[in-house]
Structures are given as C-alpha cells and as structure tokens.
Image (cartoon, rainbow, N blue to C red):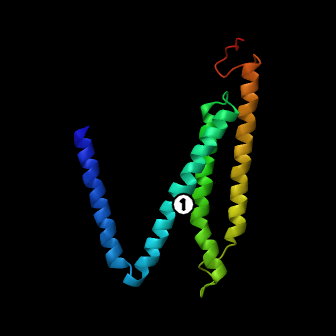
Amino acid sequence: MKAARIVLVVLGVLVIAFGAYVLVTSVKPNRIGGLATWLLGAVILHDAILSPFVVGAGLLLRRAGRSLRAWVLVVVQTVIVLGSVLALVVLPEIAAKRHGQKNPTILPFDYGTRLLIVEGVLLLVVVAVLVVGVVRARRTRAGGPRADGARATG
C-alpha cells in the first residue's frame, strides 16, 4: 500500500510539472490571469455550489423517502452532477456567442436552446426514476412482489 501511494504521489507531481511546463510554453503571459480566474471560478463553483447541492439532494431524498432504494439516490445525484458539469462547460460558449465572434463557424449552434433541451431530458430522467422508486417502495411496503421474488412481511 505504501509503495502504491508513493507511485501515485510521484505520478501526480509529474503530471503537475508537465501541466506547468505546457502552461508556460503555450499560454501568453497576458492570458494567464484570465486562465487563473477561470480555474478559480471552477473551484469555487464546485466547492460552494455543486458539492453542497448534491449532498443536500441526497439528504432530502433520504429524508423524504427512507424506503427509496440506493439506486434512486445514485441516479438522481449522477444526473445532478452531469447537468451541472454540462452547464459549466456550455455557459462560456453561450457567453462567447453573445459577445460575437469574427468567424461565425467557430460557434455555429444555438447552445442555449440545446442546453435547455438536454437539461430538460435530464429532469425527465430524474422524475421517471423518482416515480419508479416511489412506486416500487409502496409496493414493497404493501406486500407486493419484491425484486428478489420474496414477499414483504408486515
């Protein structure tokens, strides 16, 4: 275990060193400030908004339906993470398109509409999973068939 940790730490340091080398050799010095701002914003959005939201959603689901299966919680949290990361990736493209660009082929699509459609589909997935989870939980409590084929005892 100790050897694996040492290998992972050394590998991590090498990756960071390579990233720093690529940064210094490929990014103009006047652009590093914007990059640092973007990276800091990503960390703040993740730590201050996304992570607490996922944890809070998990706690609310556990309180709202203690009989919900773990897979329901996993699907809902996964959809929250996917939707959040997708929004974080697409929002800069939406902002860039609104500012205008010299070459119209760089951002050719309506990213705002597409983001809303995908987020809507993810919302439908969450609703469907919650409905299935609640229905299965009620059937199990009422003595209906369970996933393992046994009958619930009450």
Q: Report x, y in % for residue 113.
A: 73, 67
Occupied quadrant, residue 22: bottom left
Q: Residue furthest top?
A: 153
Q: Relative to residue 139, is residue 77 depicted above or below?
A: below
Residue type marked 1: Leu
Residue placed under numbered mark 1 in the picture: 45
Q: Report x, y in % for residue 39.
A: 46, 67
Q: Quadrant of the N terminus?
A: top left
Q: Relative to residue 95, is residue 151 depicted above or below?
A: above
Tell which of 95 and 52 is nearer to you. 52
Rendered residue at 34%/67% (across/down): 19
Rendered residue at 63%/55% (across/down): 83
Rendered residue at 67%/30% (across/down): 68
Occupied quadrant, residue 23: bottom left
Tell which of 148 and 58 is nearer to you. 58
Occupied quadrant, residue 115: bottom right
Rendered residue at 63%/75% (across/down): 95
